[in-house]
Amino acid sequence: MRICIINGPNLNLLGIREPEVYGSLSFTEFIDELKKKYTNISIDYFQSNIEGELIDKLHEVGFDYDGIILNAAAYTHTSIGIGDAVKAIETPVVEVHISNVYSREEFRHVSYIAPNAKGIIVGLGLKGYELALQAFL
Ligand code: DQA
C-alpha cells in the first residue's frame, strides 16, 4: 500500500511553531516513528509552503497511490485550486488538522477540501495522521 502525506504552509515548523497548539514534536521525528511502526506501508511525505507545488503533488500522486493524507493548513480555508485538485484526482483524500479548527477563529471553519474528502479528522494532534493511515489500511 502506498500512502502520501502532504502538508501545507508553515507545517515545516512543527515542533517550533506555537507548541501549545501544534505540539512539540517535529514532523520528521513523527514520520520516522510512523514508518517504523507501519513497515508494511510505503509512506511518502511532501511539504510545501507554495500552493501550486501542493497542487502539482496532488496531480503527481493522485492517480496511482492508494491514499493521500492532506493537511493543507491555511490553504484549506482559502484555496479553491487545491479543492479542485482534490476533486480532479482519483486517489481518496483524508483531510487532517492537528488542532480543532472548529474551536478556533471562524475563518478556520471553512474548508475547500472537505466537500471532496473521503473523511476528515480534526483536533486529535499528530495522532490524526496515524488514524487516517489506519482508515486506509
Ligand atoms: C491546521 C489548522 C489551520 O487553520 C492552520 O492554518 C494551520 C494548521 C491544523 O493542522 O490544525 O496551519 O491545518
Image (cartoon, helix red, strand yellow):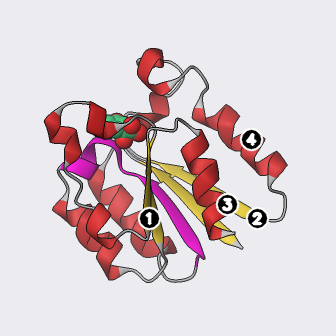
Q: Are marks 1 and 4 in contact (CB under 8 Å)?
A: no
Residue 103 drawn in magenta: no
Q: Is residue 71 magenta?
A: yes
How many residues crowd around disc 2 within 10 Å: few (fewer than 14), some, or many (20 or more)?
some
Q: Is residue 63 left or right of residue 36?
A: left
Q: Secondary structure at mark 1?
A: strand
Q: Residue 12, image x and y in percent?
A: 47, 34
**SS for tag 4?**
helix
- Residues in magenta, as a range: 65-77
Q: Residue at x 76, y 40 (%)?
A: 33
Q: CA distance from mark 1 to mark 2?
A: 20 Å
Label 2: which residue?
41
Which of the numbered marks, if any, corresponds to residue 134?
A: 3
Whether 77 is drawn above or below 57: the answer is: above
Q: Nearer the viewer, mark 1 or mark 4?
A: 1
Callout 3: few (<14), some (14-19), or many (20+) C-alpha neighbours within 10 Å?
A: few
Q: Please report whichever mark, 1 or 2, sits nearer to the chain's N-terminal start.
A: 2
